[in-house]
Image (spheres, grey):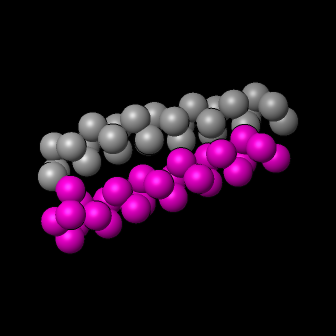
Amino acid sequence: SRLKCARAEACEAAACIEALKAVGVVKPDQAERVLELLWRACAMLTQLQRVGR
C-alpha cells in the first residue's frame, strides 16, 4: 500500500541521516532535528496503516 511505502521511505531516510551523523558528515544537533521529524512521520504512518486495515 502507499502508506507502507511511505513509511519505508521515511524510515530509510532516517537511517541515512543516522549514518551521516555517525561518520561526521552532518552535525549531531542538525541530524537530531531531522530525525525527530522523520521518526514522528514513521510513527504517524504506522498508526494510519493500522487504522486502514
Q: Which residue is drawn at 61% across and 54% down?
A: 8
Locate residue 17, reporting x and y percent: 34, 56
Locate residue 23, reporting x and y percent: 20, 71
Locate residue 38, reporting x and y percent: 44, 41
Q: In which quarter of the image is residue 50?
A: top right
Q: What stretch is highlighted in magenta?
A: 1-26
Give the vertical position of 44 relative to 42 (above or below).
Answer: above
Locate residue 22, reporting x and y percent: 22, 66
Q: Quadrant of residue 39?
A: top left
Quarter holding the C terminus is top right
Q: Quadrant of residue 32?
A: top left
Is residue 7 located in the magenta-colored stretch of the structure?
Answer: yes
Q: Residue at x 59, y 53 (%)?
A: 9
Left or right, residue 42 beside residue 22: right
Is residue 41 located in the magenta-colored stretch of the structure?
Answer: no
Q: Which residue is drawn at 33% across and 41% down?
A: 34
Left or right, residue 13 beside residue 28: right
Left or right, residue 48 beside residue 22: right
Q: Residue at x 63, y 39 (%)?
A: 46
